[in-house]
Image: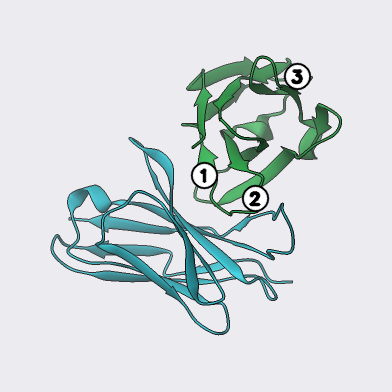
Chain colours: A cyan, B green
Amino acid sequence: KAGVTQTPRYLIKTRGQQVTLSCSPISGHRSVSWYQQTPGQGLQFLFEYFSETQRNKGNFPGRFSGRQFSNSRSEMNVSTLELGDSALYLCASSPNTGSYNEQFFGPGTRLTVL
Amino acid sequence: AQSVTQLDSQVPVFEEAPVELRCNYSSSVSVYLFWYVQYPNQGLQLLLKYLSGSTLVKGINGFEAEFNKSQTSFHLRKPSVHISDTAEYFCAVSDTTGANNLFFGTGTRLTVIP
């Protein structure tokens, strides 16, 4: 089975712009979660989508949003980019079949905001 | 909510020596516990997990961890490290409801010295 894929792998934007990142989960996985990784704050949970609905949300401003399509692919969008949004954005998919669902992580998208 | 503390940000160790990476957690509810490894420019890979049962869990690449409920700890150990174990290690917790939001520690950089 192919793993979790994220596109693009690297992205450079300027302050004030918006950006869309894409995540394709492992085939058959219905849950997609997004995390932000920065040197200062570490790994933080952004949100989770399941069956096209946001199921959980972390403590991030409304500039961060996401969606999930019927094929379980997910996108996250960041509007009005700030320098502090520079980070590695990781997505993880899971089958969501029980009380424990292993999350499989993609390689990440490295976003640099200038 | 849950939180995780990784007590050591960097751990240098000589090749073939034993290593222990420390992790303490805080939670008002039952938790699942995880250790992930991240190699440069890659996503996270699950090393091992504690869900229930035996408090000593074995993972991939010769790693093991022991869950200690009274001390709220989940330390990771390996009896003999290799150069290839050089990476960033993250301890994480989640609640047991099936929610796919992991709370991560700040990471421990393990450097194996030849």
Residue placed furthest toward the left: A16
The residue positioned 72% from the left and 53% from the top of the image is A99
Amino acid type shown at disc 2:
Thr
The residue indicated by pointer 1 is B40
Identify the chain of the residue marked 2, using the numbered disc in the image.
B
Nearer to the camera, B75 or B50: B50
Using residue A113 as the reference point, say whether residue A52 is left or right of it.
right
- The quadrant in which the N terminus of chain A is found is bottom right
**Residue marked by disc 3:** B16
B85 lies above or below B96: above
Of pointers 3 and 2, the one earlier in the residue sequence: 3
Q: Residue at x 74, y 39 (%)?
A: B48
Q: Quick one: B30 or B5, which is closer to the camera?
A: B30
Q: Residue at x 52, y 24 (%)?
A: B6
Residue at the extreme front of the image, as rendered: B28
Q: Circle 1: is it few (<14), some (14-19), or many (20+) Cα within 10 Å?
A: few
Q: Percent position (x, y) of residue A87?
A: 34, 50
Residues at marks 3 and 1 touching, judged by CB atoms closer than 8 Å: no
Viewed as shown, does residue A85 lie left or right of B39? left
Q: How far is mark 3 from mark 2, CA to CA?
A: 40 Å
What chain is tagged by disc 3? B
Secondary structure category for the residue under label 3: loop
Furthest residue toward bottom: A70
Q: Is residue A101 left or right of residue A74?
A: right
Secondary structure state at the residue bearing disc 1: loop
Residue tagged by mark 2?
B97
The amino acid marked with disc number 3 is Glu
Mark 1: amino acid: Pro
